[in-house]
Image (tube, rainbow, N blue to C red):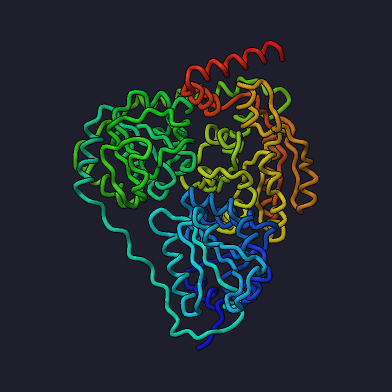
């Protein structure tokens, strides 16, 4: 039979259970969009910018239980516009299929529209990239792309469909049916026993869990309770362990962590790290002290010994490995509840919060009181979406994610502008759950026009815009060494005007007294199927533990001569203004 590549691509998407594509049609993919319009199960979502499309696909992949995000974009400019979101997905381990049109391959002409080598562009940003040259290869290639995108450490894969293959039918044989991959194999029992030896032989073990552990929350909790070990998470893994568990300490355990984590991990002589790469952010710019008795579990063996050497390394699915480890640990002697440790964690958390309460926010919104009220009102299974900035670390330190909740945030690629579109993808993935974003005004301005997409689809997403008029995470980092803040003071924006322009409801939160009512009103309007922008006059005058600790740790690692130069300059500017 004869079929076009566009028809075949949509057939493959339907087989794979793809529910949404994100992008903008152009001359190289109009045939694909026409076939998508015919599909009963795949919905194409029109966006305002391909960068927003990639973040939506990322957000959908992170929040969904049964599908992954996909792009349908034009080649060249469409790909480069989407590249920040594609790169974010790669470094954060998020599966994504990138369907791009391609130039005609049947004319022999050069200098065609969008004529650029996309495979070369995609090489550092994707797990794999394919250019299809025959109709019969369309479905098998897309199936292989999906397998690559979702196996081992997930990531984005590009499929380029030349426009002539989309437009003109070609011969294909019997259409293949999708068959899921075989389940992952069980871990090596020898390594499991060695890991148990290390953990049970320690005087005090700690657990460090990341995004890769998010499907193994029950196993992590059981191991932590059996070992009576404190638990900290990476930034991306904030939802991998319940924030209200008595052994939860916070984000990270380095000098940049909150006191509960720093104190609980002090003196740990063994560590179990799961789905965590010991990257720069969660280690406080590599200032964390990791014990030599490290048991490291990750789906990607390349992370082992990259920054901190491990005594036992186990490559595999976190849930399978931890399940086997839990059985082994339970077969040996457990440990009685360490009420002193749990009391210390609770005491440190309470003291840190009191420190924030005592901070004078004057006429603005105190972050701790905002997050306390948000936690009180939001259901445990809500989806929290963050961007990249000071608000990210405020949320990490002050807003506990409870069991059943999800948290989405850009980490290693650290693309600003993530939250607005990613929250749309999350809401499409979880339409019955409350979805809200915490986003700084600088990040918000980058992608706020995607709220038009949310409004057009009747998506009740809440955007809490922390409005202080600065790129505050960098402004705070500038203030200490430079005593000035070049190019981090924002001109605007008028948040209410953006709400009017995008079709969103607008709620003002000018001070502390307005917090509870504004959150309640936003939730009510979102339930009516309308995006809501809450203009939060946040007080950023108190630095987070992460910002203060990382600045100090980074400075300490400078050569002595450079420390003296920086300190001298800062002192002179402090005195002279």
Rendered view: 28 above or below 70: below
The reply, left or right, for residue 503 in relation to residue 180 is right
Please state the horizontal and vertical placement of residue 106, each as a whole percent of the image: 58, 79
User: Which quadrant of the structure image shows residue 483?
Assistant: top right
Rendered view: 419 above or below 148: above
Q: Residue furthest top?
A: 575
Residue at 26% in and 40% down: 312
Q: In the rendered view of the protein, which quadrant contains the C terminus?
A: top right
The answer to which of 188 and 572 lies nearer the viewer is 572
The answer to which of 295 and 425 lies nearer the viewer is 295
Please state the horizontal and vertical placement of residue 443, each as a whole percent of the image: 66, 42
Please state the horizontal and vertical placement of residue 123, each as a whole percent of the image: 49, 57
Residue 228 visible in rendering = no
Please state the horizontal and vertical placement of residue 43, each as a whole percent of the image: 61, 68
Residue at 51% in and 69% down: 131
The reply, left or right, for residue 93 in relation to residue 525 is left
User: Which quadrant of the structure image shows residue 60?
Assistant: bottom right
């Amino acid at each position: 039979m004869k079929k076009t590549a566009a028809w075949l691509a949509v057939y493959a998407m339907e087989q794979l259970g793809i529910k949404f594509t994100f992008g903008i049609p152009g001359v190289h993919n109009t045939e694909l969009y026409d076939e998508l319009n015919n599909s009963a199960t795949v919905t194409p979502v029109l966006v305002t910018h391909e960068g927003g499309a990639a973040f939506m696909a990322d957000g959908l992949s992170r929040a969904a239980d049964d599908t992954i995000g996909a792009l349908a974009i034009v080649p060249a400019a469409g790909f480069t516009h989407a590249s920040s979101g594609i790169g974010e997905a790669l470094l954060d381990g998020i599966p994504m299929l990138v369907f791009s049109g391609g130039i005609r391959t049947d004319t022999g002409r050069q200098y065609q529209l969008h004529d650029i080598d996309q495979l070369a562009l995609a090489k550092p940003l994707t797990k794999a990239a394919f250019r299809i040259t025959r109709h019969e290869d369309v479905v098998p290639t897309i199936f292989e792309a999906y397998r690559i995108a979702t196996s081992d450490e997930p990531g984005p894969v590009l499929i380029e469909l030349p426009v002539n293959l989309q437009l003109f039918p070609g011969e294909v044989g019997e259409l293949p049916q999708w068959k899921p991959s075989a389940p992952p194999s069980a871990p090596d029992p020898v390594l499991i026993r060695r890991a148990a030896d290390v953990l049970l032989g320690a005087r005090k073990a700690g657990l460090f869990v990341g995004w890769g552990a998010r499907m193994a929350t029950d196993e992590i909790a059981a191991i932590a309770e059996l070992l009576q070990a404190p638990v900290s998470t990476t930034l991306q893994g904030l939802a991998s362990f319940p924030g209200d568990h008595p052994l939860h300490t916070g984000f990270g355990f380095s000098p940049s962590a909150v006191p509960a984590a720093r104190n609980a991990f002090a003196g740990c002589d063994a560590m179990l790290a799961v789905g965590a790469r010991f990257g720069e952010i969660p280690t406080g710019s590599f200032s964390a002290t990791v014990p030599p008795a490290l048991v490291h579990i990750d789906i990607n063996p390349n992370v082992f010994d990259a920054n901190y050497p491990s005594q036992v390394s186990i490559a595999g699915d976190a849930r399978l490995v931890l399940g086997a480890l839990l059985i082994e640990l339970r077969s040996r002697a457990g440990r009685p509840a360490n009420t002193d440790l749990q009391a210390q964690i609770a005491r440190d958390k309470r003291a840190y919060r009191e420190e924030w309460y005592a901070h004078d926010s004057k006429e603005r919104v105190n972050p701790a009181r905002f997050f306390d009220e948000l936690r009180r009102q939001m259901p445990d299974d809500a989806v929290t979406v963050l961007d990249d900035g000071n608000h990210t670390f405020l949320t990490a330190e002050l807003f506990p994610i409870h069991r059943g909740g999800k948290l989405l945030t850009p980490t290693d690629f650290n693309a600003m502008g993530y939250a607005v579109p990613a929250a749309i993808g999350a809401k499409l993935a979880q339409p019955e759950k409350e979805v809200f974003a915490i986003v700084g005004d600088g990040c918000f301005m980058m992608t706020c026009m995607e709220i038009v997409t949310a409004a057009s689809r009747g998506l009740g997403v809440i955007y809490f815009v922390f409005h202080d008029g600065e790129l505050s995470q960098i402004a705070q980092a500038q203030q200490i060494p430079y005593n000035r803040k070049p190019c981090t003071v924002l001109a605007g924006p008028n948040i209410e005007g953006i709400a009017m322009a995008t079709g969103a409801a607008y709620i003002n939160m000018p001070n502390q007294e307005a917090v509870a009512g504004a959150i309640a009103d936003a939730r009510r309007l979102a339930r009516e199927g309308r995006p809501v922008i809450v203009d939060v006059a946040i007080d950023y005058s108190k630095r987070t533990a992460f910002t203060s600790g990382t600045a100090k740790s980074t400075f300490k690692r400078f050569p002595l001569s450079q420390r003296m130069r920086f300190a001298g300059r800062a002192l002179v500017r402090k005195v002279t203004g």
